[in-house]
Image (cartoon, rainbow, N blue to C red):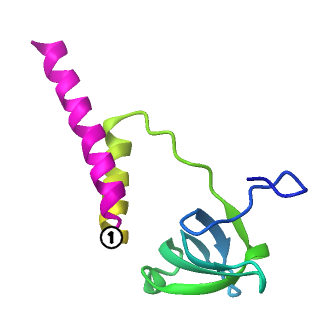
Amino acid sequence: MLNKNNVPMLETGDWVKGNLLSGELIIGFIESLSNVEGVAKVTIVTSDNKEINGRTVAFLTSQLKHLPAANVNNKEQILFQIDLALATGDEEWFNELSAKLHSINQLVKEVNA
């Protein structure tokens, strides 16, 4: 969904990037969102400050930029995303990616047979 400025509106579960007040870049996903207060609680998956990886931090929604959905094209990208799914405890995403990886492996076997 787009807002009046054609910018994607943030929703719970969205992947975002932003900067801490101290300037470190973060990438994570929105754990919870209060549109009334304009605050999003973001679980940080990766950051310039490794000590905060895995923590949930509150951000003003204006501090965050929506990341587009990844278009996975190869096995290495899927393996990386599987690692992210494991790191974030997202079982549904893990299962979806594992099924894609299995399909790729089956296709390679069929082509090589």
Residue that appears at 25% across and 46% down: 98
Residue that appears at 78% across and 83% down: 36
Per the image, label 1 sits on a secondary structure element best described as loop
Would you say residue 111 sits in the magenta stretch?
yes
Residue 40 appears left or right of 107: right
Name the main secondary structure of what is drawn in magenta: helix
User: Is residue 113 positioned above or below 100 on the image?
Assistant: above
Residue 103 appears left or right of 52: left
Residue 25 point in image, percent of width and height? 62, 72
Q: Which residue is mark 1?
A: 89
Residue 93 point in image, percent of width and height? 36, 55
User: Is residue 78 positioned above or below 58 on the image?
Assistant: above
Quarter holding the C terminus is: top left
Give the image quarter of residue 84: bottom left
User: Is residue 99 positioned above or below 53 on the image?
Assistant: above
Would you say residue 58 sits in the magenta stretch?
no
The magenta stretch spans which residues? 89-113
Residue 52 point in image, percent of width and height? 47, 85
The amino acid on which the numbered mark 1 sits, given as a three-letter code, is Gly
